[in-house]
Amino acid sequence: MRSFWSRLFWPQSQKSLDFSGIHTRIVCMKRTLIPYIQKDLPDKIVLITGPRQAGKTTLSRLLCEAYGYLNYDAMTDRVAIKKQQWDRRLSLVIFDELHKMRFWKAWLKGVYDTEGMPPAIVVTGSAKLDTYKKVGDSLAGRFFQYRLHPLDVKEATQMLGVSSEDSFERLMTVGGFPEPFLKNEVRFYRRWQQTHLDIILKQDLIETGSVRDIIAIETLILLLRSRVGSTISYASLARDLERDQTTVKRWLQLLENMYVIFPVLPYSKRISKSLLKAPKYYFYDTAFLDGDNGSRLENIVACALRKELDFINDVAGVRGQLCFLRTRDGRELDFVVVQDSSPTHVIEVKWADTTISRSFGQFASFLPPTVQKIQLVKEIPRVFSTKEGVRCESVVSWLADLSLCDDLV
């Protein structure tokens, strides 16, 4: 007969247990970037960066059947990396978290220059690999970089076969990181998110940023949670945290480098002028926000646009920037998509308001006539356009078919 504790914690029916389901789905999950990376492997080192647990290692293992995997965080692998000991007969060797090795770029350059390919080389990391400046020789001309984002409506619909409405609801409640997205349980997400943030704060930031004031950075993250969609005042954050503005800016840069947040700057024809104005910050984890549906919706759209612009840049070399428009008297458009220094889309995001924002007309003279003007609405009875050229569309449908570059192959 089972003890009290075993009866309390052990399910009545062991048939309900499934230890392999979600893991199997993650391991077999297709990602949009795979064919593009496979095309580059014979010629270039491939760097894959992105948020922790976005699926970088899983994606790398799906690139080919015969691969070797070495993680710099593992002691035995670390020794093998430094001694350059791996199976040269394999088609691919994957180096995970290699940026934690001192002078890793010079080391990698040496391997590439002396041995060439095969095996093909993939380097993955949860920090921006191009932010480590004091690491030796440059890899210029020897690599292509890809940024792997969490799932969005488009990728979940096209790659996983999840309906667009279901994908959107998951992004609202459990976010786009593969494990909680596939599990699709709020309780599981909350426990996962807590562990995810702890690893970033108590491991990654200390290792890569020489940071010790973890409690203050955690407080900074909590402050940003409630201010998504609003411009951020460095002075206000500094007062709230009882630190100077220089320190707060450095912490924000570290969180950006670790793919916790990303900034959206005000658009200006003079780039230097835009950098002087207050930015907005959005989270890669779309369910982490402490706000209403409108803030969560805006964050989902921001993540999808940022992901699409990074994708276009990584596979086609087209530079893009995500901005917003705002005047001193508070008139605003949520997003401006800039490609090759020219605005291509201006976007306003609403939860249920289908009344076209007056800001489209107020900013018309400031924008090129070819720019696409779009108001995205979640609760929309019908899609329509105005004689001024503004399209009012369903945000879910628009995100499912998102394409910012018609010429991309």
Image (tube, rainbow, N blue to C red):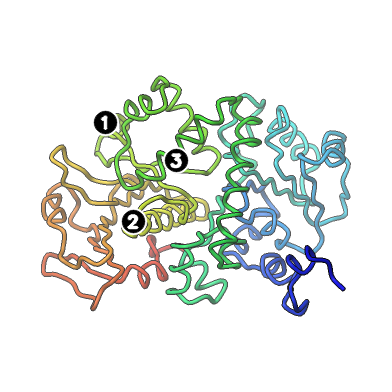
Q: Are marks 1 and 2 in contact (CB under 8 Å)?
A: no
Distance between the alpha carbons at the discs numbered 3 and 2: 15 Å
Q: Is residue 57 above or below residue 162?
A: above
Residue corresponding to mark 2: 292
Q: Which mark is residue 222?
A: 3
Q: Residue 182 occupies which quadrant of the picture?
A: bottom right
Q: Is residue 90 left or right of residue 297?
A: right
Identity, as a three-letter code, of the amino acid under mark 2: Asp
Q: Is residue 341 above or below residue 293?
A: above
Q: Residue 238 occupies which quadrant of the picture?
A: top left
Q: For marks 1 and 2, give the one nearer the viewer.
A: 2
Q: Position of residue 60 (x, y in %)?
A: 69, 56
Q: Residue 55 occupies which quadrant of the picture?
A: bottom right
Distance between the alpha carbons at the discs numbered 1 and 2: 32 Å
Q: For marks 3 and 1, give the one nearer the viewer.
A: 3
Q: Position of residue 169 (x, y in %)?
A: 44, 68
Q: Which mark is residue 178?
A: none
- Is disc 1 surrounded by few (<14), some (14 to 19) or many (20+) residues within 10 Å? few
Residue corresponding to mark 1: 273
Identity, as a three-letter code, of the amino acid under mark 1: Lys
First in sequence: mark 3 or mark 1?
A: 3
